[in-house]
Image: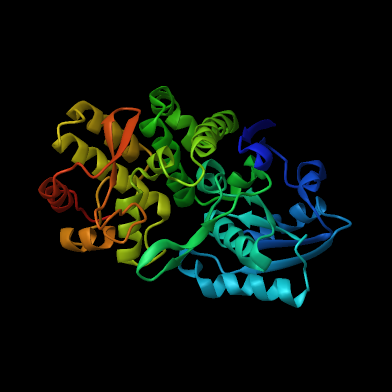
Amino acid sequence: MKTLEVDLGHRAYPIHIGSGLLPLPDLIRPHLEGRNVMVVTNETVGPLYLARQMQALAGYDTATVVLPDGEEHKTLETMGRIITALLTRRFDRQCTLVALGGGVVGDITGFAAACYQRGVNYIQVPTTLLAQVDSSVGGKTAVNHPLGKNMIGAFHQPRCVVADTDTLATLPDREYRAGLAEVIKYGLIRDPEFFLWIEEHLGDLLARDPVAQTQAIERSCRNKAEIVAADERETGPRALLNLGHTFGHAIETGLGYGVWLHGEAVAAGMCLAARLSARLGWLDGTAVERIESLVRRAGLPVRAPAALSAAEMRDLMAVDKKVRGGALRLVLLEDMGKAIVTRGYDAAALDLTLAECRAAR
């Protein structure tokens, strides 16, 4: 087992990464304040791993909520089911929620924990690659709105993260590949040596080699933990973690949540960001080719869907949390491993990039 720490002073918490971690009580129990524990999962993950997770909670007053699976269910209505269950069981402010699932379960559960009685504890137990390398760490919680992804939420840090790599064995291939987009992202924004490592070990990752998986998860989490520790509430460098996300969120919203997976949309978004960076003269063509080649090898899209016009993409991108004073800021690349948040791009260059980089998935 590997253990990292997200250094947030008195609110610091560990990230445990390894095999066979779900049933281990010593990883979770030190972070339970009271006796009431509610495990939130979904109808796909629950039959696979809920019983194993409950072994770690033997002796506690436990309850479970099983949510429908899919990004289209990441709504206020779904979150309300968790709140109703907490109230029905009369769980108090010392209760703890456990998010057992992928990014959707983690985001909804974290937001419910942030809202219930003005804030209760929760623990992240991510079961997808994307959640293990990204969404379970950092305390961003949210649900979607029909007009914009993750536009309703709160910053609420977990008490710990338990990433059991055994859960990746049952992850569908499409979802596993989608998680690789977030792994690649860390190499692009701040860790060029990691990008090179991914290029060299992508075959091992696609074969789900446990050593390569653990290494990729640990390196990704280390990068994110350092950024979150420096900028918890995204007033500065944490926004770099959104490379590809402004484009990607527009794709998810425009097509309808769940048509493209989050990682697929982010992958295309990173390639759009690279192409725009090159058009602005910041990134050379060789770098763009490396990025698109790696994304393709991972089985991910490098273009936006043809179903969305450039004008539709631009309108959807305007509903973004990085908008300041009516101006959209984008995360772009000055070099491999060097990202910036800027509004200093030419609008015509953005339009050209959006128009040219569209292809059927």
Q: Where is residue 61 shown, x and y percent of the image?
A: 84, 63
What is the quadrant of the C terminus in the image? bottom left
Q: Where is residue 289 shown, x and y percent of the image?
A: 23, 32
Above or below, 254 relative to 286: below
Give 286 or 280, whichever is nearer the viewer.
Answer: 280
Residue 344 in sight = yes
Above or below, 122 relative to 186: below
Q: Based on the displayed image, in which of its 4 quarters is residue 82 positioned?
A: bottom right
Q: Is residue 216 left or right of residue 259?
A: right
Q: Residue at x 30, y 65 (%)?
A: 254
Q: Residue at x 69, y 37 (%)?
A: 19
Q: Residue at x 68, y 55 (%)?
A: 122
Q: Is residue 211 left or right of residue 333?
A: right
What is the quadrant of the N terminus in the image? top right
Q: Residue at x 61, y 60 (%)?
A: 114
Q: Is residue 88 left or right of residue 264?
A: right
Above or below, 260 relative to 22: below
Q: Where is residue 288 shown, x and y percent of the image?
A: 23, 33
